[in-house]
Amino acid sequence: MPKIAADKLEPGMKLARPIVGKNGMVMLGEGTELNEKWIERIQDMEIAHVFVDGPPVQTISREEALAALDARFVLVEGKPFMNSIKKIVQQHIEGLYG
Amino acid sequence: MADMDPKVLRHKVENINTLPTVPSVLKRLSAVIEKPRITIVEISAFISNDPALTTKVLKMVNSAIYGFPGRIASVSHATMLLGLNVIKGLLLGVSVFELMQKTMSGLYEHSLACAVASRVIAQKKNLKEPEEVSVAGLLHDIGKVILMLEFAEEYENAMKEAQEKRVSIFDAEKGQFNATHADVGGWLAEKWRFPRNLIEVIEFHHRPMLAKNAPLETAIVHMADLLVRARGFGFAGESFVPEVNPVAFELLNLSDQDIKDVLREMEDNMQIAEDIS
């Protein structure tokens, strides 16, 4: 679910999250397919970015992410339940890279 | 400052309204929520009289973080739906946001992710008021904000020590203050007349076995805190995953799939978190 800057939107992209106004009310619903008209209005509303469907964009590489995970767990290796928790988190992180 | 007396510290914290470093918005809020018999109507009026606060509260309750995605249009609607204690907690959460950004970069992300994780686990455990647990997750580290605000130098030392000696920030705080952010948070929650359960969660999220009234809620936030750190969202003083309390872990009895679901919901909501500020 990547976050796209309003000026980078293209027709055909689908909203992964609704666009809500200042008061929290929904202006464009989740799943809306964007066309030229909607994109123009989004830009007019001074919305900085929106969420569209698609795989999330990761800022660091898979290897870096897994190395950072190891570093975070360094004090609890072998402690009760911690290895299985780590394994689940590792699978989760790997899943982010497809 | 290894000789700091916890009683003196507590006195300072409880007089937060007179601390020069505390911003006036938090002082005003503190003065309102510590009143003994404050009503929902008074809280609603307090929020509604401040347009910026109104916007922040509505954004928060309408976000996926709180499980009421979209469609809450007014403060009175929000207070009816969420109840006094959740609204009080939310108000604090949105009011300390900027403070968190200023004092400890990453603490707000940590807190928001913890609010999401706490809500998801609470729902999995069929708790009646998952929003209350979520608010507890949001506020569990509020003690860090106040310590950082009042004792910036000592707190920097604690963070440095934690990272260098590879100990938890919780243990490093003890060396600096003879107390921890959990103590400080508990004192504040008591001063602000939060319900016993919420006070316990904040006070014992590192030692969930001490919770007498709310062992399950405390275990939930303990676990949520750990999972947020495991995933690496935000920053809460050092970068180590703490050891899970085995009793709390067994009490929760989460399946692997449950934990995966919590991580997934956190992941989906964290990008949104940037927009709530």
Image (tube, rainbow, N blue to C red):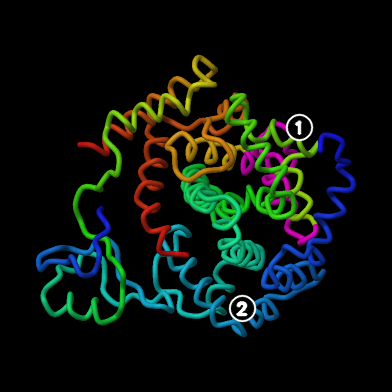
Which residue corresponds to the image point at 37% horizontal and 34% vertical from the top-left? B257
Q: Identify residue type, mark 1.
A: Gly
| Image height of B71 relative to B199, above or below | below
Q: Looking at this view, is A48 or B54 the one in front? A: A48
In the displayed structure image, the side of residue B7 where residue B109 appears, left or right = left
Q: Looking at this view, is B22 or B74 the one in front? A: B22
| Chain where mark 1 sits | B
Question: Which residue, as the protein is rendered here, is positioned at the far front?
Answer: B153
Quarter holding the N terminus of chain B is top right
Q: Which is the main secondary structure of the residues drawn in magenta?
A: helix
The residue segment tinted magenta is: B191-218
In the displayed structure image, the side of residue B239 where residue A13 appears, left or right = left
Gap between marks 1 and 2 measured at Cα? 39 Å
Can you tell which mark lies on residue B47? Answer: 2
Which residue corresponds to the image point at 76% horizontal and 61% vertical from the top-left? B192
Q: What kind of element bears circle 1?
A: helix
Which residue corresponds to the image point at 74% horizontal and 67% vertical from the top-left? B30
Which residue corresponds to the image point at 63% horizontal and 48% vertical from the top-left? B140
| Residue identified by numbered label 1 | B175
Q: Looking at this view, is A34 or B239 the one in front? A: B239
Residue B230 position, x and y percent, is 46, 34
| Image height of B92 relative to B183, above or below | below
Q: Do tags 1 and 2 sit on the same chain?
A: yes
Q: Quadrant of residue B191?
A: bottom right
